[in-house]
Amino acid sequence: MTAAKATADPELAIWERVFVPDPNRVSHEQIRYLLEIRFPQADLDRVNELSAKAREGSLTAQEKAELDQYVHVGHLLSILKAKVRSRLKDTTGST
């Protein structure tokens, strides 16, 4: 079964094929680098700002869409990292 068929989210399947190719062809350093990927501080600050406005009820439609995009990317990144961790564990026998 291909990654696209095994993953419910087609966008995640695409990201997985791009960032998590055959683990036999990717070094452990490269996998660990993928695990270190984080949102830049400016983006975290923006998410906090948008989240505060959402709690206050003053979020515009455009800001809600922006916050939704951050949440979506964050979820995809989390799932991708989980898959990378699993592949790293499978190839090394440890995390």
Image: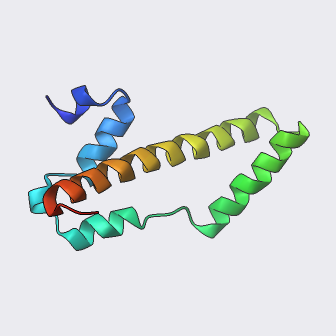
User: Residue at horizontal 38%, vertical 63%?
Assistant: 35
- x, y percent for residue 44: 66, 60
**Which residue is painted at 54% across and 40% down in the image?**
72
Q: Position of residue 50 (x, y in %)?
A: 77, 48
Q: Quadrant of residue 13?
A: top left
Does 71 sit left or right of 46 as displayed? left
Is 8 on the left or on the right of 53, as rendered?
left
- Most extreme residue toward the bottom is 29
**Residue 67, above or below 35:** above
93 lies left or right of 80: left
Q: Where is residue 74 shown, x and y percent of the image?
A: 53, 48
User: Of 24 and 91, which appears nearest the observer?
Assistant: 91
- Identify the residue at image location x=50%, y=43%: 75
Give the quadrant of the C terminus: bottom left
Q: Residue furthest front?
A: 93
Give the number of marks. 0
- Residue 20 picture location, percent across and down: 24, 52
Quarter in which the N terminus is drawn: top left
17 to 35, vertically: above or below: above
Q: How is the image coloured?
A: rainbow
